[in-house]
Amino acid sequence: MTGLPVLDDAYIPELPNYYKGKVRDNYDLADGGRVIIATDRLSAFDRILTAIPYKGRVLTQTARHWFELTADICPNHVISYPHPNVVIGKRLEILPVEIVVRGYLAGTTSTSILTKYKAGERTMYGVTLPDGMRDNERLPEAIITPTTKAFDGGHDEPLSGAEILSQKLLTEEQWNTVSSYALKLFACGQERAAAQGLILADTKYEFGVDAEGTIILADEIHTPDSSRYWIAETYQAALESGKRPASFDKDFIRAWVAERCDPYKDEIPAIPAELVEQASKVYIDAFEMITGKSFDRETGGVTLADIRESLKHLF
């Protein structure tokens, strides 16, 4: 243990309709609201590796920063923040398409445009990219690279706008609306990030519909877990040398585990406290750089008892 406070579980038996996600614990309320408690659990390889102090608070408060900044662009699910780790949001039917917006030729996963580009593909997600682009080069304009949303542990699959419509995943009106929202949100994110000395290279958005059919932004927005940020001053030299720009490197715990076992099959070895503390610092530094605010470790407390107290009005 690190000696720093961690929230690794947020089960509150007095709250109804409990659902435990990989990172967030959720409760559906009778009035149509949903309580979402961000724990400090770190998920990778389809399992929980450890808990990172303050991680849940960083993600909740970073998303809050952006939800408030972008409320005039797109309606979001937020009703209230009774605690720094907790958002009460409007319960939505999540749309079956994940909206990924990319401003740069970057990424490492099988669905990333850089992976596809290096394999020789030029037309992807309904977009054709020019020949001769370098790794991590800025795209001529931001593009949407949607994927199917795998709800049951499956893998996301690339989609084009035409496929979304032909498969009836979204109506034409829904597709046009989420596309417009996503590009406007991303433009705002890039502009604000640039003012903080950062490049918002790509991000993902999750949208849902309420009972009236209104499209609403859900989940999180422009957090270090949902977005790729680069340190702007490192970008040009990295581009010219073919290296990745400096970023908020949160993957060293994942790499440490992968070097020592098969994380999909073996027991996970005990992760050293210094690595956990290092990861916590990365998250806090990311919050402060992204938002330009000082991170508040104290307000509201971090224990489950603190959170339970903040939600007593719901019992």
Image (cartoon, helix red, strand yellow):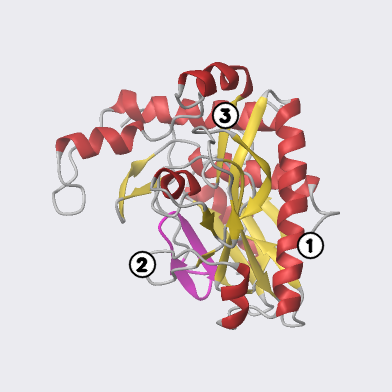
Q: Residues within 10 Å of mark 1 (few under 14, many from 20)?
A: some
Asked which quadrant contains residue 182, the reply is bottom right
* Residue at horizontal 32 percent and vertical 23 percent from the top: 274
C-alpha span from label 3 to label 1: 27 Å
Q: Which residue is mark 3?
A: 230
Q: Nearer the viewer, mark 3 or mark 1?
A: 3
Depth check, front residue: 193 or 314: 193
C-alpha span from label 1 to label 2: 28 Å
Say which label, 2 or 3, has the lower sequence index.
2
User: Quadrant location of the N terminus?
Assistant: top left
Q: Which residue is mark 1?
A: 75
Seen from this angle, which residue lies furthest front?
Answer: 131
Q: Are marks 1 and 2 in contact (CB under 8 Å)?
A: no
Seen from this angle, which residue lies furthest right?
Answer: 72
Image location of residue 271, percent across then percent down = 25, 34
Q: Residues within 10 Å of mark 3 (few under 14, many from 20)?
A: many
Q: Which residue is mark 2?
A: 153
Image location of residue 142, percent across then percent down = 68, 47
Q: Nearer the viewer, mark 2 or mark 3?
A: 3
* Residue at horizontal 74 percent and vertical 50 percent from the top: 185
On screen, residue 262 versus residue 21, left or right, reads: left
Depth check, front residue: 150 or 169: 169
Q: Is 136 included in the stretch rendered in magenta?
A: no
Asked which quadrant contains residue 242, the reply is top left
Residue 230: tell me if it is visible.
yes
- Which stretch did the figure color magenta? 13-27
| Kind of residue sitting beneath label 3 | Trp
Q: Are marks 3 and 1 in contact (CB under 8 Å)?
A: no
Element carrying mark 1:
loop
User: Quadrant location of the C terminus?
Assistant: bottom right
- The relative height of residue 84 versus residue 313 in the rendered view (above or below) is above
